[in-house]
Amino acid sequence: MKIINHGRWVPYKPSKASGIFPAWVSYFRRESDGQDWYDYIYREDTDDNGRRRVTVRDFLSSAVSIKCAAIFQPAFSAYIIGPAVADVTKLCPINQHVFEVTGYTGSDNPQEYFGGRVFDPAALAIRDRPPPPQPIDPEIAELKKTIENMQAEIAKLVRG
């Protein structure tokens, strides 16, 4: 599999609405160069009858590649993959890295394979998500258990 990083996309308010979409739409731009999301994934042209239309850009319209978005989750100190789809228009990349995987030969449901895994934008790698972090100190876990027991005892006393 080959991974193509399309960058991290952040929300912004354009000075004027895109010619393609109205002003009330949520707008995103690539953090590295300010490229607008909608201008990036769509192109405007005309059909055979001269009517204006909007189509997905060729390099993103391939059904053979999988498009994914990953958001940073501090609990894991990593970008965790959310959606994994063939259709880039299904992504809403607010504060997420968008990347594309070519050469994927897994199941017809790429979400099962990619969803919840870690995307490393620096290494262009995908790996399994580590287990959730454990309590910092075993004494904290014991203290929480004691508090829960005390709350249960107080609830019994209140009920009489």
Image (cartoon, rainbow, N blue to C red):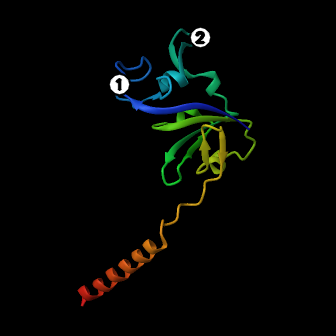
The location of residue 105, given as percent across then percent down, is 75, 42
Residue tagged 1:
23
Q: Earlier in the sequence, mark 2 or mark 1?
A: 1
Q: Amino acid at mark 2?
A: Asp
Contact between labelled residues 1 and 2, with CB atoms less than 8 Å apart: no
Callout 2: SS: loop
Q: Which residue is rendered at x = 56% and y = 35% of the image? A: 98
Q: Nearer the viewer, residue 47 or 96?
A: 96
- Establish if 46 lies above or below 59: above
Estimate how packed mark 1 is, as few (under 14), some (14 to 19) or many (20 or more) residues with alpha carbons within 10 Å.
some
Task: Give the Cα distance between marks 2 and 1.
Answer: 29 Å
The quarter of the picture where the N terminus appears is top right
Task: Find the residue positioned furthest to the top.
Answer: 50
Q: Label for residue 48? A: 2
Q: Amino acid at mark 1?
A: Ala
The location of residue 17, given as percent across then percent down, is 37, 20
